Amino acid sequence: MTQPRIGGVEAGGTKFVCALGHPVDGIRARTTIPTTTPEETFRAVIAFFEMNGGVDRLGVASFGPLVLDEQDPNFGRIAKTPKPSWSGADIVGTLQTGLGCEVALDTDVNGSGLAEATLGAGRGLDVVTYVTVGTGVGGGVIINGRPLHGLNHPEMGHILLKKRPADADFGGVCPFHGHCVEGLTSGPAILARLGHPLSDADPAAPIFDLIAGYLGEFCATLSLIVAPQRIILGGGVMSNAGLYPRIRTAYSATLADYLQSPAVHDVDSYIVPPALGDSAGVIGAMMLASIAS
């Protein structure tokens, strides 16, 4: 029996990564396309797969917010987004028509989380939370090999946090909530405070403890609400490896020994970096196509 041709698209605000192959057996063709207008970008995506013999199933892990309720008339589209010209962009309809195949859609963090939970830092566990801290903050929950959906996809980056006294004069960068996780810990939030990225700061600078304190509190909230067996923190901000030990310390202090699970006490193995690097998103996209069949 011929194996189906599986494609994946990691759809980001600056670039689309397209791949053809299999999430486990390997990628045999791959390209990166700049994110311009929806029309131009989708045209290039379709051309890539057509030049490589077409695709039977396609998974897309996209920036959002997305409309994922199949009963909603706007299903498969990007909802209101600050990305110019992308609000209302019809991802599923355009690619389904252009490639003549079914298209599975989920968030970029759910795609990366699915890959990490299956093949990466969460391998072998039933419940894994994946969070990316970068230009924005997003998170996904993978339960028994499938991303969690409810009203829509989780929006963890907009959980409100208690402001630290040292941060009292900073209003946050989120236009909706100010001092939510994204508003206080994202790359733009750090840039607004320092005038430069965290990677350019002195490793002993107070900003590290400030950001780690917020993210430690956030991770404690995730443990109390979702009860994941592991929390994976990725994204550009987390490329500053010095954050991890500080976050773990803040996490334990926030919980105050309330949770008695051995996994939580082994915090170095509980809050961890991703294992799949830059490939997690597109591998996860291909997995979305696989589990949707």
Image (cartoon, rainbow, N blue to C red):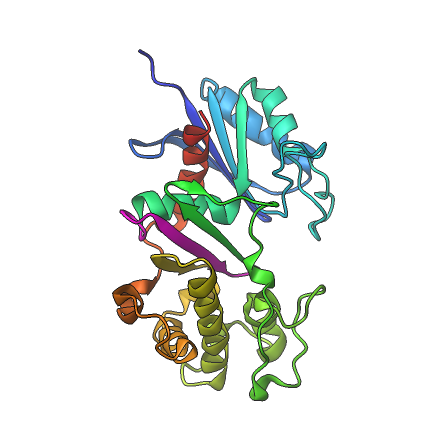
Q: Is residue 122 magenta?
A: yes
Residue 206: x percent and y percent? 48, 86
Q: Quadrant of the N terminus?
A: top left
Residue 26: x percent and y percent? 31, 33
Residue 10: x percent and y percent? 50, 41
Q: From the viewer's perspective, is residue 125 above or below residue 283? A: below
Q: How many marks?
A: 0
* Residue closest to the eye, 230 or 190: 230
Q: From the viewer's perspective, is residue 230 above or below residue 201? A: above
Residue, x 41% and y 21% (percent of image)? 5
Quarter of the image where one finds residue 159: bottom right
Q: Quadrant of the C terminus?
A: top left
Quarter of the image where one finds residue 290: top left
Residue, x 58% and y 47% (percent of image)? 63
Whether residue 201 can be seen here: no
Q: From the viewer's perspective, is residue 46 above or below residue 137? A: above
Residue 40: x percent and y percent? 66, 33
* Residue closest to the eye, 148 or 225: 225
Give the extent of the magenta segment: 121-136
Q: Please indicate whether residue 11 sits to the left or right of residue 285 in the image.
A: right
* Residue closest to the eye, 257 or 74: 257
- Residue that protrudes farthest toward the top in the picture: 1
Residue, x 66% and y 34% (percent of image)? 75
Residue, x 53% and y 23% (percent of image)? 102
Q: Is residue 253 magenta?
A: no
